[in-house]
Amino acid sequence: MRMGKKIFGFQKNIFYLGLVSFFTDMSSEMIYPLLPVFLTTVLNAPLSFVGLVEGVAESTASILKLVFGWVSDRLNKRKAFVSFGYTLSSFARPMIAFAAYPWHVLFIRFADRVGKGIRTAPRDALIADTCKVDEKGKAFGFNRSMDHAGAIAGPAIATLLLTYAIKDYRAIFALAYIPAVAAVLVVLFLVKEKKREIVCVKEPVRLRLSIFDKNFKSFLLVIFVFTLGNSSDAFLLLRARDTGIDVAMLPMLWILLHIVKMASSTPGGILSDKIGRKTVIVSGWIIYFLVYLGFAFARMPAHIWFLFATYGFFYGLTESAEKAFVADLAGSEIRGSAYGAYNFAIGAGALPSSIIMGILWQKYGVTIAFSFGAAMALISSILLLLFIKER
């Protein structure tokens, strides 16, 4: 490790924010894979309540990402919101260990997502503000890699503890405080914010679409169209089960997906720095198109293992490239608002996408359901190539 301006080839701020993502996701994934079972078997909550918890949580986060991205622009501050958001989530999340009733979990999950909504857009803007112009893809790729590494470590630790040491869900949830506190300490004491030079404007940044140019608004629309076909990955696990993969192997399938995500995110971001964002994003969407067609017609467990591994490259190519593209298209003075709008577009499409997938699967079968997701990815690729300009 170098003690100069960079750590492992990354600027210090980028590296420390990557550590924050790693510890935060480790804490989250020690809890959330076990949460539906805890709710339904320990707290005796109905399945409908599980859906309510997740729906309220994600809707809350989606709206707050938009609001606090704008607020961070308005006040010209990033770290304050990043620190508060991570602190709120980190201390709220493991409180599930002390829940006595299902509504306790609903309140805690709500608080956790409020924290995520407060921090996400300012954090992405802070990453973009920190890194060099030609290293944005690399920076976001590293952050996503660390996030996925935490998503591997968290369930692996929980599984080992449940198998060999602790049989109590509550004890596992309480132990999630350890990485959560580590994340808070890193963001409070190691992450820095460089004062940005804002071009003089006649009035403060307002929370409205008119602050963005036509190109960026078109990009948001294309993202929304793609997300309409990008349903919850839970449907992939259901497809795996129906194809003959044992339920006990589903966590291993999930870990495989995150290993590929982790391994491909940084190279995918670097590639977008070198050959352009649109090329890399469209490549990822074409992989999505092919993978969803594969899920539509898969017949054997071997097909599913191959498709899950390939699906990880979709994330590696698109997550960091899309976030770097937002920074390319929006100036520093409205960058927080831009990330808020980007996350809101994804959130707005996420809920109906899963509803559409469920209805299509139930009424017309698995082939039609997954073919719809593939078609939306292909349409989005064409729209991005034809109508979005790359700077």
Image (cartoon, grey):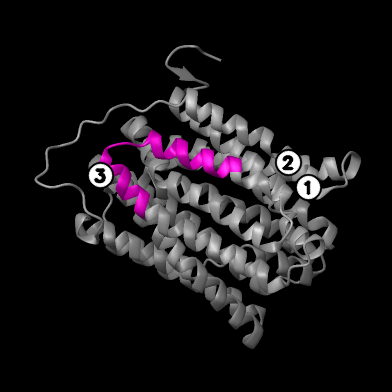
Nearest the camera: 262 or 66?
66
Q: Which residue is mark 2?
A: 174
The amino acid type of the residue labelled 2 equals Ala
- In three-dimensional space, the C-alpha distance between marks 2 and 3, rounded to whole angstroms, equals 37 Å
How far apart, in angstroms, are the residues tagged by discs 1 and 2? 6 Å
Find the residue positioned furthest to the bottom.
Answer: 363
Provide residue 182's location: percent of width, then percent of height.
Answer: 61, 29
Residue type for callout 1 = Arg
Q: Earlier in the sequence, mark 2 or mark 3?
A: 3
The answer to whether one can see residue 343 in this image is no
What segment carries the magenta color? Answer: 67-91
Relative to residue 334, is residue 41 depicted above or below?
below
What residue sits 73% from the left and 72% below the top? 46
Q: Position of residue 344 (x, y in %)?
A: 40, 59
Element type where label 3 sits in the image: helix
In the rendered image, residue 71 lying in the magenta stretch gets the answer yes
Instruction: Kindly identify the residue that appears in the image at 17 percent across and 47 percent down.
Output: 204
Return the residue at label 1. Answer: 170
| Mark 1 Cα-neighbour bin, 10 Å: few <14, some 14–19, many ≥20 | some
Q: Which residue is mark 3?
A: 74
Query: In the rendered view, does 275 fall on the left or right side of 28?
Result: left
